[in-house]
């Protein structure tokens, strides 16, 4: 079955075409336009600009696919579009586009949960590894979630963030260090030149049997620290690199500790991890090391499927369809959709 996936929940416009045959996915085309450069000067996403870009980019991406010969609209059998969570205005553009297209082609359109897209993305191209239950870890700009996945749509929340999401902490610390938005990839780049043990930033809620996350205290600790040493931040490169590395290390250690201890406590032998923050190599390495030591299998989504993309939206729709789950027809968007 040939699926067209559409993702426009935030500041990435993405379109993907996948074919699902005998439970195996083949990615026919995968396109994404990031608006990061446009939003950069504002230190965050400006919804009006996001809407304008999505409206322009969606038809442009589709025309590109048609021109390249990867997409023949008559062959598409179903459309999957993100209906939430995300920015209301951004979601509306993708959903209007999807519904208009589906109506024109006379095919169904399914509204998908972006978080489920992330949750199942570690299985893209590794479909045979999908077994229930597993421990799902989603770490993105808006969410930090640990959940026991007993089956599709059968989630038992184990922990989540009580304040800032990990990606949000990367973005906010990036801003206070004078880095461009989004802060995550920038901090990772400079952290490579720094010493991760230089400064001991707080590892929030690290105590045993607590699987919730809190990154707001860590962000504040970094703020006070650099405010006190403003001159060094401006003048000493190495100080700046060390702050980046030490901050990244604090996040990595918290994610590592909580994820592995949750897997042990809930008797889960497989972890599936994803979300923009999991594109971070240090976080991936720490998770993989500890999982190996603990004899737990860990599948971390391919880096290109960690950050927002349309393949994961088409994939989760195709998967749920295959598993016989009633997936809803997209009638409206929901910016606050949860797992
Ligand atoms: O999953 P995602 O693309 O969008 C949301 O659903 O939120 O995640 C975006 C978040 C941003 O906060 C960004 O700073 C963070 O993921 N991020 C990273 C890296 N790449 C993206 N954080 C740390 N290291 C990275 N390499
Ligand atoms: Zn996302």
Image (spheres, grey):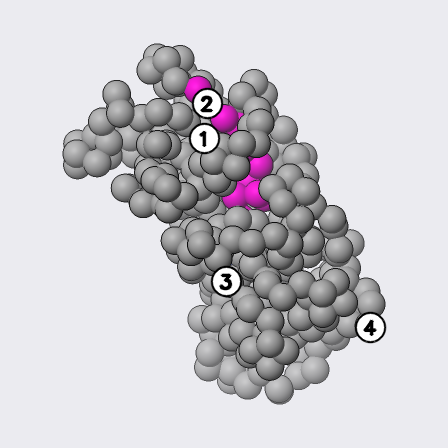
What are the residue bounds of the magenta stretch? Answer: 108-118
In primary-sequence order, the first of circles 4 and 2 is: 2
Q: Quick one: label 1, few (<14), some, or many (20+) residues within 10 Å?
A: many
Disc 4 to disc 3, how far (Cα)? 25 Å
Identify the image quadrant of residue 195.
Answer: bottom right
- Compare residues 232 and 128 and report the one nearer the observer: 128
Which callout, 4 or 1, points to the residue nearer the camera? 1
- Please say if the residues under marks 2 and 1 sit with CB atoms less than 8 Å apart: yes
Q: Is 297 included in the stretch rendered in magenta?
A: no
In primary-sequence order, the first of circles 2 and 1 is: 1
Q: Quick one: label 4, few (<14), some, or many (20+) residues within 10 Å?
A: few
- Please say if the residues under marks 4 and 2 sit with CB atoms less than 8 Å apart: no
- Compare residues 243 and 256 and report the one nearer the observer: 256
Residue 207: which numbered mark, if any? 4
In primary-sequence order, the first of circles 3 and 2 is: 2
User: Is residue 158 something that shows in the picture?
Assistant: yes
Disc 3 to disc 2, how far (Cα)? 29 Å
- Compare residues 183 and 4 and report the one nearer the observer: 4
Residue to which mark 2 is pinned: 109
Disc 4 to disc 2, how far (Cα)? 45 Å
- Please say if the residues under marks 4 and 3 sit with CB atoms less than 8 Å apart: no
In primary-sequence order, the first of circles 4 and 3 is: 4
Q: Is 117 included in the stretch rendered in magenta?
A: yes
Residue 80: which numbered mark, if any? 1
The residue sitting at 39% across, 26% down in the picture is: 78
Q: Quick one: label 3, few (<14), some, or many (20+) residues within 10 Å?
A: many
SS label for mark 3: strand
């Amino acid at each position: 079955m040939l699926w067209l996936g559409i993702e426009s929940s935030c500041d990435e416009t993405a379109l993907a075409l996948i074919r699902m045959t005998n439970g195996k996915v083949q990615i026919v085309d995968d396109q994404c336009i990031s608006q990061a450069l446009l939003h950069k000067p504002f230190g965050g996403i400006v919804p009006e600009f996001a809407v304008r870009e999505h409206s322009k980019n969606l038809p442009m991406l589709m025309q590109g696919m048609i021109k390249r010969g990867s997409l023949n609209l008559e062959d598409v059998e179903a459309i999957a579009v993100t209906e939430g969570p995300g920015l209301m205005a951004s979601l509306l553009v993708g959903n209007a586009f999807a519904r208009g297209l589906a109506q024109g082609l006379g095919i169904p359109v399914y509204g998908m949960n972006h978080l489920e897209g992330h949750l199942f993305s570690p299985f893209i191209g590794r479909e045979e590894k999908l077994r229930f239950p597993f421990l799902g870890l989603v770490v993105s700009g808006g969410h930090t979630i640990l959940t026991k996945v007993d089956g599709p749509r059968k989630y038992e929340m184990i922990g989540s963030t009580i304040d800032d999401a990990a990606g949000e902490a990367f973005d906010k610390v990036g801003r206070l260090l004078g880095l461009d938005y989004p802060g995550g990839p920038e901090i990772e780049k400079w952290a490579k030149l720094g010493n991760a043990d230089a400064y001991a930033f707080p590892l929030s809620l690290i105590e045993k049997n607590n699987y919730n996350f809190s990154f707001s205290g860590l962000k504040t600790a970094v703020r006070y620290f650099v405010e006190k040493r403003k001159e060094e931040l401006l003048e000493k490169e190495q100080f700046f690199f060390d702050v980046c590395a030490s901050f990244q290390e604090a996040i990595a250690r918290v994610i590592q500790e909580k994820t592995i201890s949750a897997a042990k406590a809930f008797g889960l032998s497989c972890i599936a991890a994803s979300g923009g923050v999991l594109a971070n190599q240090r976080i991936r390495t720490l998770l993989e090391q500890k999982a190996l030591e603990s004899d737990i299998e860990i599948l971390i989504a391919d880096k290109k499927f960690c950050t927002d993309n349309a393949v994961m939206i088409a994939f989760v729709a195709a998967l749920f369809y295959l598993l016989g789950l009633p997936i809803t027809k997209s009638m409206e968007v929901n910016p606050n959709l949860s797992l």
